[in-house]
Image (cartoon, coloured by chain):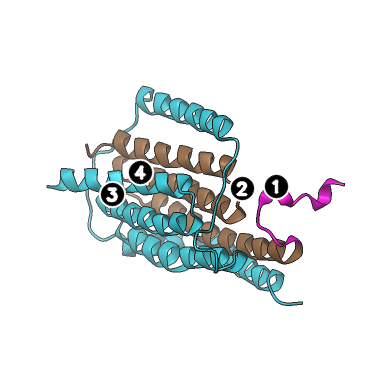
Amino acid sequence: MDSLQSYLIIAAILFSMGIYGVITRKNAVAILMGIELILNSANINFIAFNRFGGMENLDGHVFSIFVIVLAAAEAAVALAIVINLFKNIGSVDVDDADLLQG
Amino acid sequence: MAENLFIIIAALVIASAFWVVFSPNLIHSAVSLIFTLFSTAGLYIFLYADFIAATQVVIYVGGILVLIIFGVMLTNSIDTPSIAASSKNQFIGGMGALTIFVIQVAVIFNTPWHIGTEQSRDSTVASIGNLLLNEYLLPFEIISILLLAALMGAALLSRRT
């Protein structure tokens, strides 16, 4: 069970579910949750490759720290945008955000 | 024992991620995301990544998830007991996600992965600190500036004008 493939399969399932959430959800915050799932699956891949590729260096850990920092920055900016959207059009449904469509 | 624990944690990751994506109630999605992130930290511990597991709990569960729940609460009226999160394009989305998953599984099982020799180690914190302050110093500083700029931008965007 504790092999590289099992971790990669878990990450693949998480990634596909995140893609599904991003495609199907209409609420902007729910789309953000899908993006978090995708970033988590990338992190699992980094750590799993680092552990099973031999642990003499820890570059994968450093990369996953960078991914976590980027996720934090992305969540803060995205939620600010979502709150602004709610103030301007009174809804967070991404289908309603068509002000630029002319 | 460890095998059973691994299976339980993996099942928890997948089941809670499933509920994040499919729950009709947005608050339920957010709470389910807590379980996904916590059990992902458990997976990191299985992979000898103690520092990353702690970082995952502190930053994701303590920071990002609180932000997301704030976002849910601020953009929906609290009076409605169920904050609906409707979906659309289920068929296209399901087909797309399934295609990506099948491609990934095919790649995972058809690639001869390089498996290293050294399979365990002590605490990783000191090595990560060395890497961050020697080899990865420039990316570390750049990402610090990026985080600062992003947080200032978020504060600027969401202030009351």
Mark 4 falls within which chain? B
**Residue at 47% across, 37% down:** A16
Mark 1 falls within which chain? A
The residue singled out by tag 4 in the image is B14
Q: Which chain is cyan?
A: B
Mark 2 and mark 3 in contact (Cβ < 8 Å)? no
The residue singled out by tag 1 in the image is A95
- B95 in relation to A70, above or below: above
- Quadrant (top left/top right/bottom left/bottom right) for the C terminus of chain B: bottom right
Q: Nearer the viewer, mark 2 or mark 4?
A: 2
How many numbered marks appear? 4
The residue singled out by tag 2 in the image is A26
User: Which mark, by number, is residue B47?
Assistant: 3
Real-space Cα separation, disc 2 to disc 1, in angstroms? 7 Å
Q: Which residues are magenta?
A: A89-102
Front residue of B52 and B161: B161
Mark 3 falls within which chain? B
Real-space Cα separation, disc 1 to disc 4, in angstroms? 29 Å
Mark 2 falls within which chain? A
- Place of residue A101 in the rendered image (x, y in percent of width and height, measured from the top left): 83, 46
Quadrant in the rendering for residue A89: bottom right
